[in-house]
Amino acid sequence: MRPGGTLIYLLKTVFVEGQDRFADLFPQYPPAYIYQSASRVPWRAVTNGNRSNTVAYAVYIWKKTQTHQDTKFRWFDWQRQPAPVFLAGGRFYEFDEAQRYWRPE
């Protein structure tokens, strides 16, 4: 990752589990943010009117400039609010639910 870069992945929630990531990845490279989706993402096609999915997803964000070791954990519901984060012009923005606007991080 370039200096000052941001890496964003949509991954299964179980990504935070596992002894290898606990021992090797997260101590050295903790995510700056984890945004847990409150609603399941329906990736599969509708079958008999059912769009459910049994897998939970979260948005994981690493920032090259971060100097902290604490990961900020937040919730979002993709069905009821805008995407929790986005990048524009190389800047990371987070949706401020209370103020209802995009706040630069």
Image (cartoon, rainbow, N blue to C red):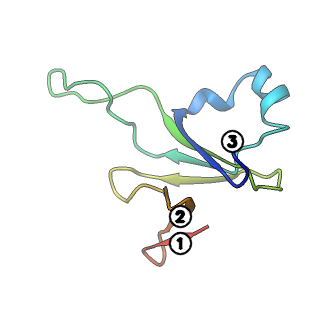
Name the residue that disc number 1 marks: 103
Name the residue that disc number 2 marks: 93
* Vertical side of 72 occupied by 52: above or below: above
| Image quadrant containing the N terminus | top right
User: Which residue in the rendered view is the most extreme toward the left?
Assistant: 48
As drawn, is 72 to the left or to the right of 74? right
Residue type, label 2:
Tyr
Which residue is drawn at the image coordinates 70% and 45% (left, top)?
31
Q: Quadrant of residue 104?
A: bottom right
* Vertical side of 1 occupied by 14: above or below: above
Label 2: how many Cα within 10 Å (few below 14, some 14–19, many 20+): some
As drawn, is 75 to the left or to the right of 42? right
Label 3–label 1 contact, CB within 8 A = no
First in sequence, mark 3 or 1: give its number.
Answer: 3
Q: CA distance from mark 3 to mark 2?
A: 19 Å
First in sequence, mark 2 or 1: give its number.
Answer: 2
Residue type, label 1:
Arg
SS for dot 2? strand
